[in-house]
Image: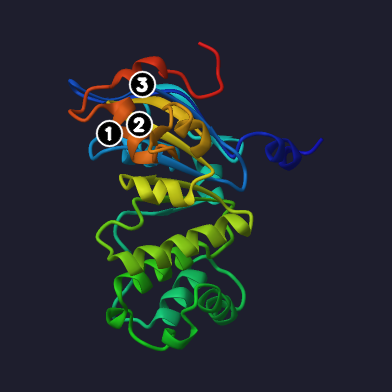
Amino acid sequence: MSASTERGREPAIRVQGIEKSYKELHVLRGVDFEVAPGSIFALLGSNGAGKTTVVKILSTLLRADAGAASVHGFDVATQPANVRESISLTGQFAAVDEILTGRENLILVARLRHLEDPGQIADDLLARFSLTDAGGRKAATYSGGMRRRLDIAMSLIGDPPIIFLDEPTTGLDPQARIEVWDAVKKLAQSGTTVLLTTQYLDEAEQLADRIAILHEGRIIVNGTLAELKALLPPAKVEYIEKQPTLEDVFFAVVGSDGAAGRAGDKTSNPVGTDA
C-alpha cells in the first residue's frame, strides 16, 4: 500500500497531548483532537484560550513543548517541510497587496509557487470566489469581505489538501462574514480539510462538522453540534420545546465567569469517548 493511500485512511490532522508554555504561562495543557479529511473542524474559544498557538504548532511556526501532532500524515516536528507542502495558512488579517489588482495578487502567488499558466489559475479562482468582475480593480478598493475571499483564494493556489483559517471573520461586518462563510463551505465541498479557529459561537454553529471548545489550554468538550446540544436538556415553555443553542452549551461548559461550569465538569472528555 502506498504512502499516499495510507495518509488517505488516517485523520487529516491528529493532535495528541500537545503542551506549550511561555515561562510561567501555560498556554496549552495537553490538547487532543482529530480532524477527518474533507471536513470543517472548529476550534472554539475566547481570546487567549490558545487557539492561535495550536495553529502555529500545526503549521510548523512554533514547536510544542510536549506531545505529538501530524498533518496529512506527516509529523510536524520531524517532517516540517512535508507539512508545509500540504497546508496553507490564512491568518487573522488579510495579507493581500493593496497596490495590485485582485488578479495580479493571484498571479504573483502562482508565479512564486512556480506553477504553469498563472493567469488561468487566477481567472479560475476569481470565478470560484465570485470576484471576476472585481479582478481588474486594485485590492485597496475591495470591501472587507472581498479582501478576505481574495486572501483565501490566494491560500488555495497549489491546491493544498489542508487549510488553516485563524479567526477568518475578525472585524468583518455581518454581510462580509456571510460571504466568507459561503467561501469556507465551498472549500469543504471541494474536498479541502479546514481547521477553523473562532471566538464566534454562531460561526462554529454555521460552518463546522465538528466543534471543540478550548478553555484554559484544554479541550473541555468535542463533538458534533447535535452532540454538544445534547449535553443540555431542552427547555419547555408553554409546551413548545426549545433546543439549546451552541451559546448555551459554551457558557455551560466554560462558565459565564470564565470558570468551567457544571456541564464542563461532566464533559471533560470528548463526546463519544470513554474516560
Q: Using the image, determine if residue 222 lies above or below residue 92.
A: above
Residue 242, x across and y down, in percent: 42, 40
Mark 2 crowdedness (10 Å alpha carbons): few <14, some 14-19, many ≥20: many
Of badges 1 and 3, nearer the viewer stands 3
Mark 3 crowdedness (10 Å alpha carbons): few <14, some 14-19, many ≥20: some
Residue 115, x across and y down, in percent: 58, 70
Colour scheme of this structure image? rainbow
- Of 73 and 232, which appears nearest the observer? 232
Marks 3 and 2 sit apart, C-alpha to C-alpha, by 14 Å
What's the residue type where badge 3 is placed? Ala
Q: Quadrant of residue 60?
A: top left
Q: Is residue 77 visible?
A: no
Asked whether disc 1 touches disc 2, contact meaning CB atoms under 8 Å apart, the reply is: yes
Label 2 sits on residue: 214
Label 1 sits on residue: 49
Marks 1 and 3 sit apart, C-alpha to C-alpha, by 19 Å
